Amino acid sequence: MILLAGTSEAGKSSAGEYLAALGARRVKIRTVLVQLASGRQSYHEGIETREDFRFDEFASKLLELSDHGEAPLAVESFIDAALAKTMKRAWPAPCSIIFITAPEIVRIKRLAQARGLTANEARRIIRRKDERKRVHEQIPNWRAIADHWIDNAADIIIFRARLLDVFQTMQTSSGGIQP
């Protein structure tokens, strides 16, 4: 399994799309969390979910989504380092955590171009998202647990080459078999 995390607008979705094109089973973390949204509500990973869900419940939901085949899961977008760390330990097959980041100015430029925004509008969106997700607060935790730290400041070719390397390593180390 490959867990994708990172700063806002750094390329997590692009990474998920590319890994899916390589053969990974792409799953948005929101899909899993919505299934845990019964009971008392709490804000977690960007959505309202049940306050007391256990990490093993999250793992069970991921196992249900797994096709038990050769394709690794690529789960995006983790914002909680503790959940990612627990998932890596609990997953019954090799698991890598990729943290994707890029300088704020690069993220602003890309978002502004993609959505037709001004630089100030894009900056406000990115800063609000980073603040809401406590990205900067958790950077030390991510540095401690990430297997791969990808700076997505360069072009798409370099970015994809790094992702391909991780994907191929996962395929080789696990024999391609998922639980």
Image (spheres, rainbow, N blue to C red):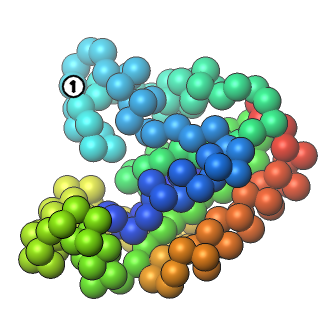
Q: Is residue 20 left or right of residue 76?
A: right
Q: What kind of residue is marked 1?
A: Gln
Nearer to the camera, 48 or 145: 48
Q: Is residue 30 above or below residue 40?
A: below
Q: Secondary structure at mark 1?
A: strand
The answer to which image quadrant residue 170 occupies is: bottom right
The answer to which image quadrant residue 13 occupies is: bottom left
The answer to which image quadrant residue 54 occupies is: top left
Q: Is residue 95 left or right of residue 173?
A: left
Residue 119 screen position, x and y as percent: 15, 78
Residue 57 screen position, x and y as percent: 50, 24
Identify the residue position indicated by label 1 in the image.
41
Residue drawn where x is 84% and y is 44% of the image: 176
Q: Is residue 172 left or right of residue 25?
A: right
Q: Residues within 10 Å of mark 1 (few under 14, many from 20)?
A: some
Q: Is residue 38 above or below residue 144?
A: above
Q: Is residue 27 left or right of residue 110?
A: right
